[in-house]
Amino acid sequence: MARPAPDPARPTLGIIAGGGSVPPAVARAAVAAGRPVVVMAIAGEADSTVQAFPHHWVRWGEIGRLFDLLVREKVGEIVICGAVNRPDFTSIRVDLGAVLSLPKILSLMVGGDDTVLKNVVRFFEDRGYAVTGAHAIAPELVAAAGVLGRHAPDDAARLDVARGFEAARALGGLDVGQASIAVGGRVVALEGIEGTDEMLKRVADLRARGRLKAPARSGVLVKAAKPQQDLRVDMPTIGPRTVEAAVAAGLGGIAVEAGRVMIVDRAATVAAADAARLFLAGVDGAAP
Amino acid sequence: MARPAPDPARPTLGIIAGGGSVPPAVARAAVAAGRPVVVMAIAGEADSTVQAFPHHWVRWGEIGRLFDLLVREKVGEIVICGAVNRPDFTSIRVDLGAVLSLPKILSLMVGGDDTVLKNVVRFFEDRGYAVTGAHAIAPELVAAAGVLGRHAPDDAARLDVARGFEAARALGGLDVGQASIAVGGRVVALEGIEGTDEMLKRVADLRARGRLKAPARSGVLVKAAKPQQDLRVDMPTIGPRTVEAAVAAGLGGIAVEAGRVMIVDRAATVAAADAARLFLAGVDGAAP
């Protein structure tokens, strides 16, 4: 693995990489900024494209080995990013480091998603690592305010955007979902633990069964961060699949909280929205 | 039809009856209180048991005939109750009264459920009728505070009850759903237009697929009225079917806002909860 010589003033950035395109995007941005990086790729999760960067494959449960590697690679700052499935603990083989950390690790898994992630961050911070958000390294991942594609919301859509953000805000303090769908000026669906894609599927079903009557291409998916959300490790995301599901739900567009929602595969996401004549907008209005 | 002679001091109570057991329960309570009643049974909706009381069958669209009957029967006060499917307007044959009221009727149907019902109430009030809630005539329909069946919530369940009410409150101002499900101290599902039964089914699915891991008989369905809800015509309800769906979702109990949620078929509902070892409780805590 060819890699830049470590610069003591700029410690190596360790990227703990789950699946998808965000980890390679972060690695690319760091390298472009002249920053040494090493990817700790989670086996079974991380995309093979991370192999273009200095990397190690690490299995769930190899906590001891992970921390050894972080020391050996002189990592001072880490980014935790990419999609992971909550591991099935029954199938994990743990190393000594994991055994020693087990009570701590089990306590990480109790509570809502916010609590779990807060604990994961603290777990690394307690061991001397600064935890940085993917968006701090690669700010282009985050939605800016304004229309992002070729289509813009009309007045009816703007009302749905406002209603959707109201609902997202109302839920914000509760560590519940972070998305809602408004159609015809009315909130029709709220995200719980099922996630955004399944909420969209629900609305597609309600529409197919005539339980929700609305013109084609009307209604808006709104996605926002919770006020207390740790954006370093848990920024809400949308991507091409979100657009597909929004199209299937008959919606007219997607509005995300500007500066606090990540767009994964932006080019593909915007292209999919443009092709389906959906608007895609970053909106500042999520704060009260 | 044998009926008591109208008492000018206590005008006849008109019961505009949708489906289910609430309209006959209201009629029974009124008759027991010595009050003359007439049921305006909506054809295709009202249960045949309303025929035990003075009644007329009225079709959707027969607004003119309905108001004629209300006058003829000397109705001064009405109760609108029972389940109705939102009518399919394409299949309705309207009479002259409906045609004359059509712009008004169409405007009734715009907006969230709250708005629609508020407009329906105003429609009758504008024509000189007092609109009363079913629970004012038959207060035994409403959940009181306290444990209603044989089982009581434990500490974990009480935490879920508190979390569920928090979520219901947060949604209250938005004319969205009025129910939520909390499991293990965490809100996992929120009701949109899909309704309580479908939300429960969703949680059953999440559990079956391992997306929600929790011990058997844990978690709580919470149902509350929205702060602005017009309880005269739109009181939230639970019934035996709700208990069945809560059992299928693996929950440990059901908590409803005391004084503001109706229990349809109370004996059957409590029996079903007892048989499945679910608690059923009325809770005052829904107000902030």
Image: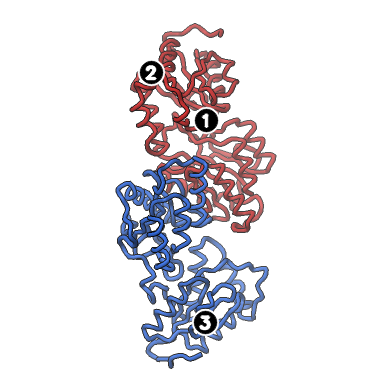
Chain colours: A blue, B red
Q: Chain of mark 3?
A: A
x 42%, y 37%: residue: B113
SS under mark 2: helix
* Residue appearing at x 34%, y 57% in the figure: A286
Q: Position of residue B187 (x, y in %)?
A: 52, 53
Q: CA separation, marks 1 and 2? A: 26 Å
Q: Label 1 to label 3, Cα distance in Å?
A: 60 Å
Distance between the alpha carbons at the discs numbered 2 and 3: 75 Å
Q: What is the chain identity of the residue bearing mark 1?
A: B
Residue nearer the viewer, A203 or A35: A203
Q: Residue furthest right?
A: B275
Q: Earlier in the sequence, mark 1 or mark 2?
A: 1
Considering depth in this image, is A90 or A5 the residue closer to the camera?
Answer: A5
Q: Can marks 1 and 2 be said to lie on one chain?
A: yes
Badge 3 element: helix
What residue sits 46% from the left and 32% below the top? B234
Identify the amino acid type marked 2.
Leu
Quadrant of the image for the C terminus of chain A? Answer: bottom left
Badge number at residue A51: 3
Q: Is residue A121 above or below residue B250?
A: below
Q: Which residue is mark 1?
A: B83
Would you identify the image quadrant in which residue B206 lies? bottom right
The answer to whether the residues at label 2 and label 3 have Cβ atoms under 8 Å apart is no
Of badges 1 and 2, the one in the foreground is 2
Is residue B138 toward the left or the right of residue B108 in the image?
A: right
| Amino acid type, mark 3 | Gln
Q: Which residue is mark 2?
A: B96
The extreme top residue here reads B5
Q: Are marks 1 and 2 in contact (CB under 8 Å)?
A: no
Number of numbered tags placed on the structure image? 3
